[in-house]
Image (cartoon, rainbow, N blue to C red):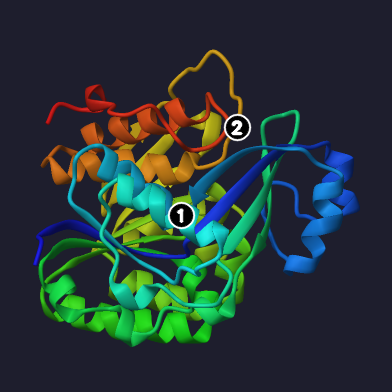
Amino acid sequence: MSHFRILGFGHAIVDLLAKASISTIHQHNIKHGGMTLIQPEQVTTLLDDLSVTVKAPGGSTANTIRYLANLGHNTGFIGGIGDDDNGLFFNESFLKARIQTPKPCYIRNDNTHFSVICITPESERSMATFINDNLAITPDMIPNDWLDVSEYIYIEAYLWNHTKSRNSILDMANHASSKGKKIILTLADSICIKQNLDALKSFCFDKASYVFANHEEICALMETDQIDEAKYKCKQKNNVTWVITEGKHGACVIKGMEYVHLPAVSVPKVIDKTGAGDFFAGGFIHGLLNNKSLLECGISGSKAAAKVIQQIGTSLPFKVNNLIQR
């Protein structure tokens, strides 16, 4: 059994990226700058109004894990993958990146999750996403021996939207905690947080060692519309290291009374914000895995995010070993 630096849990999604006007996403009832769940039959009419330019493996956790794998870390991923064309495409990309996935995660005769990512002229991404409930994470997908040989466990909050996946994650987290594993949660989406508020607050406060969030997500979790109040509440939960990204205002890391501000990295032009938070998390965790300070981890995260927003999609030219000295 391999030793995993990090084991990720999330949706295995194939991203279909296309440029779109704001009027087009409104016409199709897609939330601007957020994620809207759709059914496969809705995609046909949506794609009639778009031209897909990039197909890429995606999903919040999957992006972060793939980034870390391409930086040379031994990684694993757990999430349901169908055997359709999208599933084969996703699987091939993970095999190339040497990411290990347990055999029970491969589901026969079913469709893989996918997301049509609409990139509007101001470089915002709005996602129309199909999540196949038949691909929920189940206990048989999670080998206890994989947990036992993992240093970090990484989870996306999207999984709380699906009862089977959520229950499997909670059982897994109890086992991982009993073994002294460090759990990282990325909050992923403000609507998801509001729909699962009590459960996610409990998990963040009681199980997580690190929580990643953006401005909207941390405010949703802390039940305030004031970012300063949200940060104050983070300081009170000093058993958690809070990592908060704020776009052009940079980011910060809060651990009790320790507060680290990270200015935004200047880039010539923002092309596409897809994956910015996922790659920030990947860069930050790359620092953790190399025993760097919170400041150095944050700088690594900022550089990773700055790199991915200068292109369409999340397939970076690797390896980017100058992000932080290993």
218 vs 132: above or below:
above
Which of label 1 and label 2 is nearer to you?
A: 1
Where's residue 5, x and y in %? 16, 54
Query: Which residue is found at the position 54% from the left and 36% from the top?
Result: 313
Where's residue 308, x and y in %? 47, 31
Which numbered dot is residue 90?
1
* Element carrying mark 2: loop
Which numbered dot is residue 272?
2
Q: Is residue 235 left or right of residue 244?
A: left
Query: Which residue is found at the position 34% from the left and 47% from the top?
Result: 66
Name the quadrant containing residue 176. Answer: bottom left
| Residues at discs 1 and 2 in contact (Cβ within 8 Å) | no
Can you see residue 232?
no
Quadrant, the C terminus: top left
Name the quadrant containing residue 140. Answer: bottom left
Where's residue 174, x and y in %? 24, 83
Report, in whole angstroms, how far the alpha carbon at label 1 lies from the one at label 2: 21 Å
Query: Which residue is found at the position 50% from the left and 77% from the top?
Result: 135
Where's residue 178, x and y in %? 14, 81
11 vs 306: above or below:
below
Crowding at dot 2, Cα within 10 Å, few <14 / some 14-19 / many 20+, comes out as: many
Three-letter residue code for mark 2: Asp
Three-letter residue code for mark 1: Phe
Q: Earlier in the sequence, mark 1 or mark 2?
A: 1
Can you see residue 180?
yes
Q: Nearer the viewer, residue 192 or 234?
A: 192
Name the quadrant containing residue 29. Answer: bottom right
